[in-house]
Image (cartoon, grey):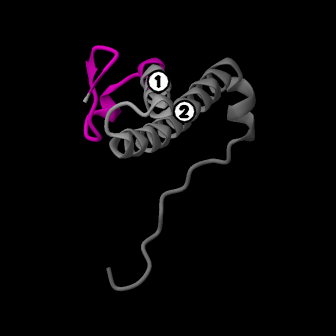
Amino acid sequence: MIVNGSSVTRYNLKNKSLYTLRAIQATLAHYVGQGWGDVTEEKILMKLISVEIKRQVKVENINLAAKKRSEWIVNHWDLVERRSEPLHPLHKEGPY
């Protein structure tokens, strides 16, 4: 299906940006409201787009939290080093 000049299938949603997905979703909602095209297929795509938007937002939040934590560690290394326990090698137990 072509929406906003872009080919949209259930298989290429992961390749679209959040901005593009939201624009496509709004266009599809308009099409459904007007009863244009294959409403069932449009509703399925809208639901899949919602899932993909939520996935991408969660990934962005995880990446942002990791970046902030990394920056904090670099900026507060002396504090981190004082809190750290010395590393000890793992001891093997059992016959192996």
Which secondary structure lies at badge 1? helix
Please report the bounds of the magenta region as a residue range.
2-21
Quadrant location of the N terminus? top left
Q: CA distance from mark 2 to mark 1?
A: 8 Å
Which three-letter amino acid code belongs to the residue tagged 1?
Leu
On screen, residue 5 versus residue 42, left or right, reads left
Q: Residue at x 54, y 32 (%)?
A: 57
Magenta region includes residue 62: no
What kind of element bears circle 2?
helix
Name the residue that disc number 1 marks.
18
Q: Position of residue 77 (x, y in %)?
A: 67, 25
- Nearer-the-camera pick, 8 or 63: 8
- The mark found on residue 86 in the picture is none
Q: Residues within 10 Å of mark 2 (few under 14, many from 20)?
A: few
Task: Give the labeled residue for mark 2.
Answer: 57
- Residue closest to the eye, 35 or 85: 35
63 horizontally vs 24: left or right? right
**Rendered position, 75 above or below 52:** above
Tag 2 and tag 1, C-beta contact below 8 Å: yes
Q: Nearer the viewer, mark 2 or mark 1?
A: 1
Figure check: 68 above or below 48: above
Residue drawn at 68 percent across, 18 percent down:
75
Q: Quadrant location of residue 61?
A: top right
Q: Position of residue 67 (x, y in %)?
A: 57, 25
16 in the magenta segment:
yes
Tell me which amino acid carries mark 2: Val
Between residue 80 and residue 39, name the one nearer to us: 39
- Quadrant location of the C terminus? bottom left
Which quadrant holds residue 2? top left
Residue at image point 42% right, 73% down: 92
Q: Earlier in the sequence, mark 2 or mark 1?
A: 1
Mark 1: few/some/many CA within 10 Å (<14, 14-19, 20+):
some
